[in-house]
Amino acid sequence: MYESRKQKKILLKNANLITESGETLTGQDLVIAEGKISSGGDCVFDQVIDCTDYYVTPGLTNLHCHCAMNLFKGIAEDVDADTWFNEKIWPYESRLEAEDVYVGTKLGIAEMLNCGVTAFADHYFEEEAVLQAVLELGIRVDLAPTVFGSAPDFPERLRAVSDFCEKNRRVSGRVSLRMGPHAPYTCPPPFLEKIVKRAEELKLGLHLHVSETREQVEQSLQSFGKTPFAMAAEAGVFAYPTLVAHGLWITEEDFKYLGEETWFAFCPKTYGKFAMGTDFMFPNRGRISYGFGTDGAASSNTLNPCEQARFFAMLGKYGAKDPCDYAAREVWQALMRGHGAFSFGTGKLTEGSPADLVIWDLKKPNTWPVYDPVNSILYSSEPSNVAYTMVDGVFLKEQGKLVFDEQALLEEGARVQRRLLKRGQGQAKVIY
Ligand SMILES: [Zn+2]
């Protein structure tokens, strides 16, 4: 259990630090005390780690995730996005119970900690179960309970989500909350406006899917005469801190709607798998604030932001027909920049910053020898290169192993999977 783990005074001795801009500083001593990076002071430590052979970086962030959906990874491959959702995933998903979401979320968090993720943005239902999993395992979350405007229980759902946010506003320094309208097309104007109004009253940001596919934009133009970005803007979304999942098919006119605190979560592996197209958003990336998300593992199979960054570079270079574009430093900075979308103040290795970091062991066959550690991490690393993951000054992965019982978690996962298959497919409540 997380709460029984204490923040210790730790010395990371003689470390090679890689900053958020991609600069390497060798021979650095880093002191962790009371959950923060500090200058040291006295020299009595609970733990000293010789980091001569290690690289220390800020933690990774996952800006868009449906964590519990990793229960469905691999259940539906080689189909288009509509079939994937309406025929394969949603029928099972519609019968998920709170305990399934709890176990699925814990599995997802375990995978993310293995990959060096210290904070993730989740967008899902059964938010109590998601929160419980987060509090137990110790990662940070930016949690947006999903709301469908077109669902018959919309008023009750909006009330429940508002109550949840109010109740848990200060539940932990590792938790922040947002309202999570699913998307403009599943939350038509009056519904989206109501959700935004609640966000304003509760002083919360928003997290929603916008313009994921070309079809969504065409459908929106046909039904409302406006793009999904225009719909979201009219409902007031961009006046508040907003995480836009994807935004892949943003149009030239849409850029004017974006606010100062609008962040995009790019999930390139999903775009590749669903052949969603990268023609517009990728070349316009310099005009927006973006980081990487993984989406649910049902579509992208893994919850590893570093892998998404790698895909981003590949798809970008390939699409631009230019191997010099999407340079490693640019991609690294985008990977690190995700912290800016959150309110945790994480993302730096400087004094006073929250101690959310990764210690990489690159002395392994897949990454050794190292010429440039940023290149090695971006292009060669695997989760097995993450030796330590620290959140809020506490190691949640240590010496290459998660600090909680991974085997018990896998068994819980197997039990939930058996139950899901036995329960079978239900009726989709909302058609995308
Ligand atoms: Zn999504």
Image (cartoon, rainbow, N blue to C red):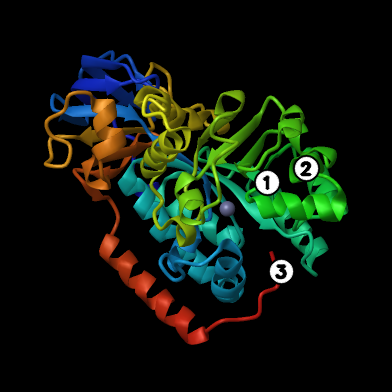
Is 77 above or below relative to 13?
below
* Residue at 38% in and 17% down: 350
Cα–Cα gap, marks 1 and 2: 8 Å
Quick check: marks 3 and 2 in contact, CB under 8 Å? Answer: no
* Residue at 84% in and 56% down: 223
Residue sitting nearer the eye, 222 or 89: 222
Tell me the amino acid under the disc marked 3. Answer: Val
**Which class describes the residues within 10 Å of circle 2: few (<14), some (14-19), or many (20+)?**
many
| Ligand 1 neighbours mark 2 (CB distance < 8 Å) | no
| Ligand 1 neighbours mark 1 (CB distance < 8 Å) | no
Quick check: marks 1 and 2 in contact, CB under 8 Å? Answer: yes
Residue sitting nearer the eye, 78 or 344: 78
Q: Which quadrant would residue 322 be assigned to in this image?
A: top left
- SS state under label 2: helix
- Disc number for residue 210: 1
Residue sitting nearer the eye, 137 or 249: 249
Quick check: marks 1 and 3 in contact, CB under 8 Å? Answer: no
Cα–Cα gap, marks 1 and 3: 17 Å
Q: Which quadrant would residue 313 be assigned to in this image?
A: top left
Residue 22 lies left or right of residue 133; in this view the side is left
Tell me the amino acid under the disc marked 1. Answer: Val
Residue 180 lies left or right of residue 333; in this view the side is right
- SS state under label 1: strand
**Which class describes the residues within 10 Å of circle 3: few (<14), some (14-19), or many (20+)?**
some
Horizontal and vertical percent for residue 117? 39, 42
- The residue at the far front in this view is 321
User: Which residue in the structure is indicated by mark 3?
Assistant: 430
Horizontal and vertical percent for residue 1? 36, 54
User: Which residue in the structure is indicated by mark 2?
Assistant: 232
Residue sitting nearer the eye, 409 or 304: 304
Horizontal and vertical percent for residue 398? 23, 43
Is 214 above or below relative to 31?
below
